[in-house]
Image (cartoon, rainbow, N blue to C red):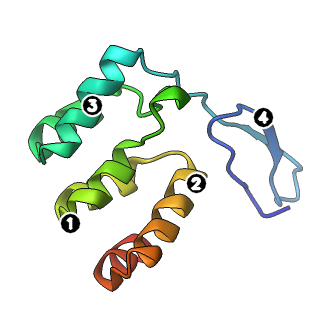
Amino acid sequence: MNAFATEPLCGKLSQSSSESGGYRIFAVQEVLTPDDARTLLALCESGKLHDVEKWIASGKSFRVPPELKKTPLGVALETGFHSLIESLVRHEPDQSVKNHALTTAALMKRLDLVELLVS
């Protein structure tokens, strides 16, 4: 296990590699209501960077219900709006969402987005 391996959506304990053998608890992010999720996705689709940044600053969740089959980061990738992608990836707590975004950018053959996601 890596030191402080993150699992932000499951709230599990993860042992650190420190000699004290301490544990770290990760926060569980709430799933948005379908209406809130649609609002966030619409902001991303329309490239409303400042509104998305306000959403982030307010501490609201990014977790979209699975039935919507989209993530804010995925929608931002579709638009190709670099500043929006940077902001979302910087604040996205779920590594699997980031990994999926990287795979999507590679499949889109968008080297600029791949570089943005790994920097």
Q: Quadrant of residue 32?
A: top left
Image quadrant holding the C terminus, namely: bottom left
Of the numbered discs in the image, which one, if any, rests on residue 12?
A: 4
Viewer-proximal residue, 28 or 67? 67
Query: Which residue: 62% across, 40% down?
Result: 8
- For the residues labelled 3 and 4, say whether their Cβ atoms are less than 8 Å apart: no
- Could one spot residue 57 in this view of the protein? no
Which numbered mark, 4 or 1, is in the foreground of this view? 1
Viewer-proximal residue, 90 or 65? 65
Of the numbered discs in the image, which one, if any, rests on residue 40?
A: 3
Q: CA distance from mark 3 to mark 1?
A: 17 Å
Q: Which residue is mark 1?
A: 82
Looking at the rendered structure, the kind of residue marked 2 is Gln
Query: Which residue: 37% across, 51% down?
Result: 73
Pick whichever of labels 3 and 1 is earlier in the sequence: 3
Q: Secondary structure at mark 1?
A: helix
* Mark 4 nearby-residue class (10 Å; few <14, some 14–19, many ≥20): some
Q: Secondary structure at mark 3?
A: helix
Looking at the rendered structure, the kind of residue marked 1 is His
In the shown orientation, is residue 74 left or right of residue 103? left
Query: Which residue: 35% across, 43% down?
Result: 72
Pick whichever of labels 2 and 1 is earlier in the sequence: 1
Q: Secondary structure at mark 4?
A: loop
* Mark 2 nearby-residue class (10 Å; few <14, some 14–19, many ≥20): some
Image quadrant holding the N terminus, namely: bottom right
Q: CA distance from mark 3 to mark 4?
A: 27 Å
Looking at the rendered structure, the kind of residue marked 4 is Lys
